[in-house]
Image (tube, rainbow, N blue to C red):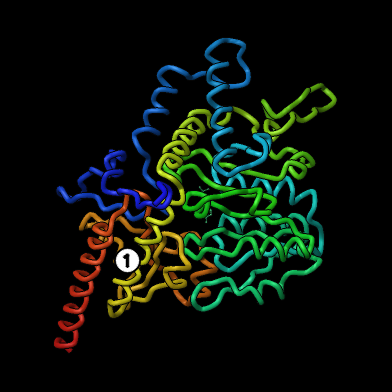
């Protein structure tokens, strides 16, 4: 068995994450099942950021002094770490942003305003996060274009026929998530790219839930842009990435204007800097970038494929046990078609009550629409619960959630019985 294929030891890895030793609500151990919202960070990442602040910090790219040059080296080394992680062909294709949302807005403004016009269409899917919907609505409003939604099936899989029907010569952008943040559905990005290319559309992949949980090779992926966030992959918040194909980025106008993104400024105007500085106006997220590099090194040491396999086992385990419960409806496809995300609704109990009651027992899950209101509307619900897994979760975490669900269902059943007998 190769190291890559061997199972990771999540119980041992937990020791790398100090926050997982927290006790909540009168001494209950924290069971953290909300990594799709934000993962936790290992000591290696926290330490890299502390060291940067204590010993390596100055503003980047501007100083001629030693500390600035050293910090610039660290910042640019982080860009190289990202390039390696996603196998981009050049560091110039890696633009640091504050997160996925900022990266998607950058594309919608810079590429979108230059290439999308009246009567054009932008094709997204019904399962997108608001970050991959709203910037396209805003672009459509600015340019007189229209946003179309590719349908999903009842079990939360992209309807490829419906997608193809909505794709036409008018489609300028196809914007799709690699993995749904609610359903966990792994989308067939390669097929989507092939179809979009044939129609002449550019493909923007929202990789917020995909890049942290599987191997990414942008050269193989074939898409034009990919956005993701550091805080969902053991890194800090405040840092994200826009990867773009170089010829597209080269031809795009800058998005934000300010320091660092210029070649020259005169009283008559300005010229833009070369890539990637052109898209990094102002002081960038320096220390978060250093933290992201440490996170990448950490997950690379474990092996992204091993992390994905571990999460897949947890997803299958959660599915098997949740399916066995009466009154629990699982959303999305069977476990095999999912990344480490399991969402569900419980009959007669509001999602917020479920999350609140589980939290009292120390179990942190998500409740609400998860920034995917069109998806919830499509599924005929207003809110759901989401448990999401990362390299540090174990089946015992899922058992704790199942126990909490059992207790709250029993409580609600008793309450119903009392109400019926009082009638
Ligand atoms: N897209 C998806 C699929 C997400 O899950 C998220 C985060 N919930 C985002 C976009 C937005 O990411 P961020 O808040 O880091 O910008």
Q: Quadrant of residue 117?
A: bottom right
Q: Could one spot residue 233 in this view of the protein?
A: yes
Q: Residue at x 53, y 24 (%)?
A: 74
Q: Position of residue 15 (x, y in %)?
A: 27, 40
Task: Spot the residue most to the right.
Answer: 268
Q: Position of residue 245 (x, y in %)?
A: 71, 45
Q: Could one spot residue 357 in this view of the protein?
A: no
Question: Is residue 423 shown left or right of residue 202?
Answer: left
Task: Spot the residue most to the top.
Answer: 65
Q: Position of residue 60 (x, y in %)?
A: 58, 22
Q: Residue at x 17, y 51 (%)?
A: 28
The residue carrying pointer 1 sits among few (fewer than 14), some (14 to 19) or many (20 or more) residues within 10 Å by Cα, namely some
**Mark 1 Cβ and ligand 1 under 8 Å apart:** no
Q: Residue at x 52, y 63 (%)?
A: 186
Q: Is residue 318 above or below residue 297?
A: below
Which residue carries the number 1 mark? 317
Of residue 327 and residue 193, the one placed in the foreground of this image is 193
Q: Position of residue 207 (x, y in %)?
A: 56, 52
Q: Quadrant of residue 99?
A: top right
Q: Residue at x 57, y 54 (%)?
A: 131
């Amino acid at each position: 068995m190769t190291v890559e294929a061997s199972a990771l030891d999540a119980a041992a890895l937990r020791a790398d994450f100090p926050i997982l030793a927290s006790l909540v609500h009168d001494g209950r151990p924290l069971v953290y099942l909300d990594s799709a919202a934000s993962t936790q960070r290992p000591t290696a990442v926290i330490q890299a950021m502390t060291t940067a602040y204590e010993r390596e910090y100055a503003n980047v790219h501007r100083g001629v002094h030693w500390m600035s040059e050293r910090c610039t080296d660290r910042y640019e080394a982080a860009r190289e770490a990202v390039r390696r992680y996603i196998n981009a062909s050049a560091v110039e294709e890696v633009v640091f942003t504050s997160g996925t949302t900022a990266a998607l807005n950058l594309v919608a403004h810079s590429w979108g305003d230059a290439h999308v016009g009246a009567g054009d269409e932008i094709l997204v899917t019904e399962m997108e996060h608001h970050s991959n919907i709203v910037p396209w609505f805003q672009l459509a409003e600015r340019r007189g274009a229209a946003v179309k939604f590719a349908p999903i099936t009842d079990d939360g899989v992209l309807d490829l026929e419906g997608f193809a029907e909505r794709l036409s010569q008018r489609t300028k952008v196809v914007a799709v998530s690699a993995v749904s943040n609610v359903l966990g559905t792994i989308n067939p990005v390669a097929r989507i790219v092939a179809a979009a290319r044939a129609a002449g559309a550019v493909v923007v992949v929202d990789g917020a839930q995909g890049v942290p949980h599987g191997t990414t090779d942008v050269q193989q992926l074939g898409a034009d842009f990919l956005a993701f966030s550091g805080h969902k992959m053991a890194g800090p918040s405040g840092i994200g990435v826009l990867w773009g194909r170089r010829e597209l980025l080269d031809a795009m106008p800058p998005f934000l204007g300010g320091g660092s993104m210029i070649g020259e400024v005169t009283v008559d105007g300005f010229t833009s800097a070369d890539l990637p500085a052109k898209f990094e106006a102002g002081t960038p997220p320096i220390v978060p970038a250093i933290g992201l590099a440490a996170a990448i090194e950490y997950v690379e040491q474990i092996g992204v494929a091993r992390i994905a396999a571990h999460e897949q086992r947890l997803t299958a385990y959660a599915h098997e046990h949740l399916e066995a419960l009466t009154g629990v409806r699982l959303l999305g496809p069977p476990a095999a078609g999912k990344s480490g995300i399991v969402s569900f609704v419980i009959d007669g109990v509001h999602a917020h009550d479920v999350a609140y009651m589980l939290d009292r027992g120390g179990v942190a899950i998500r409740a609400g629409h998860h920034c995917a209101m069109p998806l919830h509307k499509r599924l005929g619900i207003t809110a759901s619960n989401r448990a999401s897994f990362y390299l540090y979760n174990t089946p015992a975490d899922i058992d704790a959630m199942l126990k909490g669900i059992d207790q709250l269902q029993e409580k609600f059943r008793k309450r119903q019985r009392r109400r019926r007998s009082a009638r």
